[in-house]
Amino acid sequence: MSAQIRQERDAYYGILEQTQKGTLDITPWMEWFVGCLARAIDGAQNTLHQVLEKAHFWEQIKSVPLNERQRQVINRLWNGFEGKLTTSKYAALAKCSQDTAHRDILALVARGVLLQNPEGGRSTSYALAPVR
């Protein structure tokens, strides 16, 4: 709840000020608080869903041989990676050459961990395979 209030700090202080300077009717504050609590619960449920989905993914691929670079990039994809994964981005994330990144990616595609997105050529990018 405290994290949600921090996210909504301006609204929190606004409703507190409104309640203190108004008629002392706390109904608007209670409505805001209950709404904030609902948003906090929704956020917690979303976080839990993501954690469980990630755990299920790792369980699903536990027998797939992965090197440390591949593990690092896969974790980054699960933890809010922005945009599409390309060989260049992989190389930057894993701190390796483009050739090594390309070999790592091809191995992950062959093992069903990554899928190549439909656009190809210079726009070739990859995404995590869906969790089954």
Image: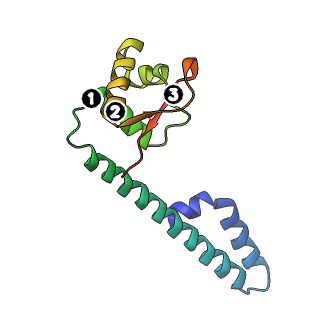
- Residue with the mark numbered 3: 125
Residue 39 x, y percent position in the rendering: 57, 68
What element does badge 1 sit on? Answer: helix
Res 100 quadrant in image? top left
| Snapshot colouring | rainbow
What element does badge 2 sit on? Answer: helix
Q: Which residue is depicted at the point 37% across and 16% down?
A: 96
Q: CA distance from mark 2 to mark 3?
A: 18 Å
Mark sitting on residue 128 = none
Residue 60 x, y percent position in the rendering: 28, 48
**Whether label 2 touches label 1, CB < 8 Å:** yes
Mark sitting on residue 72 = 2
Residue 43 against residue 71 in the figure, above or below? below
Say what amino acid the circle numbered 1 marks. Answer: Glu
Upstream in the sequence, badge 3 or badge 1?
A: 1
Say what amino acid the circle numbered 3 marks. Answer: Ser
- Residue with the mark numbered 1: 68
